[in-house]
Amino acid sequence: MSVNIYATDMLLVTIITLSLIKYATLECIIDNRTPNNDFEIELHKDLLCNYKMFEPPDKRLTQIDVRVVLKYFNFDDKEELFTIDTWMYMIWNDPRLKWNPEDYDGIDRINMRSMHIWTPQPFLYHKEDFYEYESLYYPVRCTIISTGNVTCIPRATHTVLCKTTLDNWPFDAHNCTLKFSIREGVKDNMTFVSMTRGEYIYGSYNTTGWNIVDFKIMDNLTGNIKLSLTFITERQALGIAAVVITPSITLAALTVSSLFLDVKDNIRLALATFSLLSSFQLLDIISEILPHQGSDSPTILLFIRSSIVISTFSICLCLILRSLRGRGRQPYRWVTSFNNYVSKSRLNFLLLLQYQTLSELSSDETEKLEGWFVFTYIINNVYTITTLVVYLILFIVYIPRPQPLK
């Protein structure tokens, strides 16, 4: 009997305790509802009542103002794919979504899902997307003002094939264009107008290895193309230039400097040989970092190729002049005539670059070698001046440099 009484008391205590806890927590409930929440619900119902979301605001012409916000971009030069991730601000006026704020407790703006109202999102697309599914616009929240102005900010990713040109590598720049059209079968007469002239894009301007140096937007082009976005991307080339361009110029300077040494100096032959072998080694390094796409060859390769040819001729010339200087017989008559013609004509400046005077030779050597001595100097000086001019032209034509924006 006592056990039953104890169980009954415990049940009664439990019920009383739970009742007290429930009563105590009633006052702790937070009411997040705003005073005009009922008016907002009523406004949604009134706006969407008899609203036909598949009909445009104006059947004759619906103007959509556009601003592009670039959040991210990537250029894969190996696959020649340009990818952008954008927010596209779209603003237009829909007279069917107007209301008087005084009738709804002063509410002058509301948010609605894009799936409940007419928007230009399903109609605008980039038909040349490499990955078509990435160009889809997903439902977003649109802001509606009491005047009927609607603002939607869809986010989308677009990937397009962008042909690479490598003639100015590593300072190569590429034009990648995305053309947005109206889907076929849509009879809505829509026009897209950029909101601001001169400042169209905000957000990210660089990514790993690339910079966006310029951006152009064109609207209402011919045909069904409504928007055209052109991005000019430039490679971040300072690191590559230090590995490719600087050594190329250094090796060229090394080849030229060797020409100012005497042909019998072993250092001259060593410098020219070192420059030649280093040029081949530089080509091996370039082959590892050079993009393999593109039909045109980088001009820096043409510079290195020309430098290899000059270094080869420099080595051959050094060996030939050495052989002539070592002759013990008297020079040929035409050699003597050539030396006299140069010394007595306006070409005598070619004798100013002598590296050794004849007075340092003995009388017997002077008598035998004077002709060959002068002849080799003339030939060497002509080759030196010609090489300087050729390298100057090669530097101007073939050395890549950053292109100024137009």
Image (tube, helix red, strand yellow):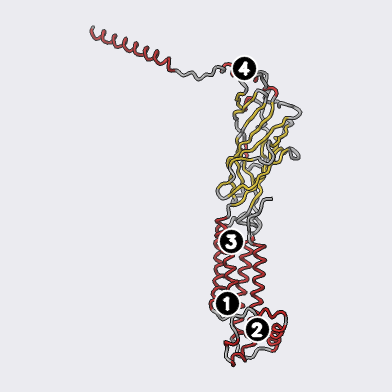
Q: Position of residue 272 (x, y in %)?
A: 57, 73
Q: Give how far apart the Cα atoms at labels 3 and 2 are.
A: 37 Å
Q: For the residue carrying disc 3, how many other residues have a C-alpha within 10 Å: few (<14), some (14-19), or many (20+)?
A: some
Q: For the residue carrying disc 1, how many other residues have a C-alpha within 10 Å: few (<14), some (14-19), or many (20+)?
A: some
Residue farthest bottom in this picture: 364
Q: Are marks 3 and 2 in contact (CB under 8 Å)?
A: no
Q: Position of residue 375 (x, y in %)?
A: 65, 83
Q: Are marks 1 and 3 in contact (CB under 8 Å)?
A: no
Q: Position of residue 222 (x, y in %)?
A: 76, 40
Q: Nearer the viewer, mark 1 or mark 3?
A: 1
Which element carries disc 2, helix, strand or loop?
helix
Give the residue pinned by disc 3.
Answer: 245
Q: Amino acid at mark 1?
A: Leu
Q: Is residue 347 left or right of residue 274?
A: right
Q: Amino acid at mark 3?
A: Ile
Q: For the residue carrying disc 4, how many other residues have a C-alpha within 10 Å: few (<14), some (14-19), or many (20+)?
A: some
Q: Amino acid at mark 2?
A: Phe
Q: Which mark sits nearer the N-terminus, 3 or 2?
A: 3
Tell me where residue 401 sits by quadrant: bottom right
Q: Give how far apart the Cα atoms at labels 1 and 3 are.
A: 26 Å
Q: Amino acid at mark 4?
A: Tyr
Q: For the residue carrying disc 2, how many other residues have a C-alpha within 10 Å: few (<14), some (14-19), or many (20+)?
A: many
Residue 375 image label: 2
Q: Position of residue 338 (x, y in %)?
A: 70, 84
Question: Could you say which is closer to the camera, residue 210 or residue 10?
Answer: 210
Q: Which mark sits nearer the N-terminus, 2 or 4?
A: 4
Residue sitting at x 62%, y 51% = 234
From the viewer's perspective, is residue 392 above or below residue 240? below
Residue 261 image label: 1
Question: Could you say which is closer to the camera, residue 365 or residue 158?
Answer: 365
Give the residue pinned by disc 4.
Answer: 104
Q: Which mark sits nearer the N-terminus, 3 or 4?
A: 4
